[in-house]
Amino acid sequence: MEIPSKYDPNRVEEHWYDYWMKHDFFSSKPDDREPYTIVIPPPNVTGVLHMGHMLNNTIQDVLIRRARLMGKNACWVPGSDHAAIATEAKVVAKLKAEGIEKSDLTREEFLKHVWEWTHEYGGVIFKQLEKLGCSLDWKRKKFTMDDDMSASVIKVFVDLYEKGLIYRGYRMVNWDPEAKTTLSDEEVVHEERQGTLYYFAYPIEGSDEKVTIATTRPETILGDTAICINPNDERYHHLKGKKAIVPICNRVIPIIEDEYVDIEFGTGCLKVTPAHDENDKNLGDKHDLEVIDIFNEDATLNSYGLHYKGKDRFVVRKEISKELEEKGFLVKTEQHINKVGTSERTKAVIEPRLSDQWFLKMEGLAKPALDAVLKNGDVKLYPKKFENTYRHWMENIRDWNISRQLWWGQQIPAYYYGDGKNDFVVAENKEEALKKAQEAIISNGVEKSLTVDDLTQDPDALDTWFSSWLWPISVFNGILDPDNEEINYYYPTSDLVTGPDILFFWVARMIVAGYEYQGKRPFENVYLTGLVRDKQRRKMSKQLGNSPDALKLIKDFGADGVRVGLLLSSAAGNDLMFDEALCQQGKNFANKIWNAFRLIKGWEVEDLPQPEAAKIGVDWYTAKFNQTLAEIEDHFSKYRISDALMAIYKLVWDDFCSWLLEIVKPAYQQPIDQTTFDAIINLFEENLKLLHPFMPFLSEEVWQHITERSPEEALIVSNWPKRVNVDTDLISGFDFAAEVISGIRTIRKEKNIPQKEALELSVLNSGEVSNKMDPVISKLCNLSQMETVKEALEGALSFRVKSNEYFIPIGGAIDVEAEIKKITDELNYTKGFLQSVKKKLSNERFVSNAPEKVVAIEKKKASDAEAKIETLEKSLASLG
């Protein structure tokens, strides 16, 4: 097979991916092997590949490919998430652009549009993952809205309701006025923003007195139903039992007393708006206050907003403060920084809102999941530092608001059959609901026959996370059929790779679901990646325009180059500062390997005796390979994927390409012996096995070029190298030899002695070091002679490695006078430098006042100078 002169990733990547797919290398079925399972963190169904996805999925592919090489039954399950809020928002926007309002459509009509959108744009990211080389079992592709996945969600809802863990409650919730749905506390991002603190005067009924109130939200004045003072605040004792008048709307409201009010904050008087603040709602319940909701679902004002009806809350904020100023109610304003809650999905400012919602009691459910991570170690987080974050969330867990005011998603299986708020039943389908509703009516002594048409299903959908928390179970049908062959074989899964930003959203909840529905952990290890940031440390995002086009990167640098570039600087849990230069480094590495392969295959092979240097080189690299293999496996065991790659990178680039190939390379236009060639090919194949998880395309391409192979012999299904005992003496001996070689090469460079000119080398051997590596030194340095001497050679250049001193006779090739002058000049300069450093160190004031680190640096300078002077004096003596 002809080997192209250059490695062209665009030529080979599609070919090998198709080859792997054709031969079904990615698919998995239960058998007698040890399973290794990963479930993909399901990307949004209409999502596209961004840098975070590339990092996350590259790591998963590295783990799954390595497991495959280790002989495990590797199963990587792909899938996507219906992403209710994001997807529904996109479809609503699309329809609006076409002149269609969601409110004009029935639920069925709207969902038809969503499914059309999903079919048109869904799956794009999967094609992109193929380009990256991800070896997912595509036959297992799942979607959170698949019939069986939805049925699993509904079954779990009914089960939890019947256990008394799901309830319906009228609560203050986080309302996203853009998506027009409630959000859980975890979906709200709190941001510090510069705002204004407004001071307004409220008249006291029946007097000329006014009381001043401070607020950051003047628009909510129209919903005030009380003013609250602290009973211990002497400034306001005289207001007890009186009433105040709300400006503009002129509503008369009571002045109440409660120790909740902070005497020190603002004016010590608090306006109470029970419909628009959770703490105010608690005060309102305690003091039986009226609740006035002034907002529509899109955060425009309703009829309670008077002449501001229909206007947006932020527009009203400006206009009402101006009106209050004109009418003499504004006392003053101050700049004020406060935390504003925003929607994680739409970025809209959250509005606290009273609403009937469905909640899941979490405290009892969370206990096994808390113990799994923090007590018994059933689930391990990498890096370990995230255990503190996990502990904080789980020990302070609140009931989960699981309902959303959306149509896209699993519709809540609650069916209303009467006029009362609590006249409902929960069932997996309408038929079952009808039976339960009929039983409920009869138990209440009512004789009435119901039909399906008498039932009205709750219009809300379930939180998207309520489907994805079942992901590791439901992808194997473990909810609908909890004892099936696949769930018993593949569950618990092995590793989960995800971002720390969804440690609670998704990871913790999956652990909760795992113990509730399978009685065991959903996975053993959680590898938490860092965020991908740009060189300015900004998080990559579409809004900032700093996220590169993933497919363009793959086209420019090759999938392997991008994978290596991402992983080389991506330690677990630490943010990655992305720079395209990293991908260039990965591309250069691929080219280095390709060129090494072409060099080897270009050698003519003959049946010749094996040179001693080549034998030593092969033995050394074999030892070095096994030593590095142990390091790599240790890194993998600790999920230090970046460190594992760096160890392979150094092994291949430095030890194999730069050292071993130079040691065994035959002389110009000369053949190589068969023994050495076979050994080099074997070692190259072992390198390719290590490289394959990181660089699947390049490694398979080279593997298949080495010799013709059947599909069963493809690299993807070969065997991970097996470790053998390491000859550490051989490795340390070579490290010593490398220093000697470096010393000789330095002399050649400094004296401009060409490599083709043979040198003689003499060594004053201390007896501490073996001369086993001499053939390697001789080959790489082109030595005509190596001898051991008993005393220093005069008139020779020298250098020291540990306790051995090496001499190269200069003969006529060196201008002795010029060399003596050069060394003398350097010696005089170094002595002067040493004198200046010693003068500084003898200055007691400097030593006493300078930082300890600075003094240490000066002392190091002095010792280095002294060592250099000793070497220069010896060199000068040898020339004299």
Image (tube, rainbow, N blue to C red):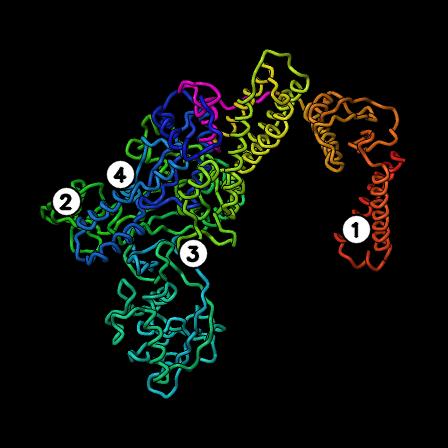
Answer above or below: position of 510 versus 92.
above
Real-space Cα separation, disc 1 to disc 2, in angstroms: 91 Å
The single residue placed furthest to the bottom in the displayed view is: 208
Please, what is the three-letter code of the amino acid marked with disc 3?
Leu
Real-space Cα separation, disc 4 to disc 2, in angstroms: 31 Å
Q: Which one is nearer the viewer's eye here, 513 or 58?
A: 58
Q: Quick one: SS at disc 3?
A: loop
Q: How crowded is mark 4: few (under 14 residues within 10 Å), some or many (20 or more)?
A: few
Residue at numbered disc 2: 438
Which residues, given as a range, are shown in magenta? 695-724
Residue at numbered disc 4: 146
- Comparing marks 3 and 4, which lies closer to the viewer? 3
Q: Which one is nearer the viewer's eye here, 411 or 204?
A: 411
Q: Does the magenta stretch include residue 423?
A: no
Please, what is the three-letter code of the amino acid marked with disc 1?
Glu
Tell me if label 1 and label 3 are in contact, CB under 8 Å: no
Real-space Cα separation, disc 1 to disc 3, in angstroms: 47 Å
Q: How crowded is mark 3: few (under 14 residues within 10 Å), some or many (20 or more)?
A: few
Disc sitting over residue 858 in the figure: 1
Q: Which one is nearer the viewer's eye here, 832 or 234?
A: 832
Q: Which residue is drawn at 30% across and 59% down?
A: 178
Q: From the top left corner, tell me how far across and down residue 201 is, in percent.
A: 39, 81
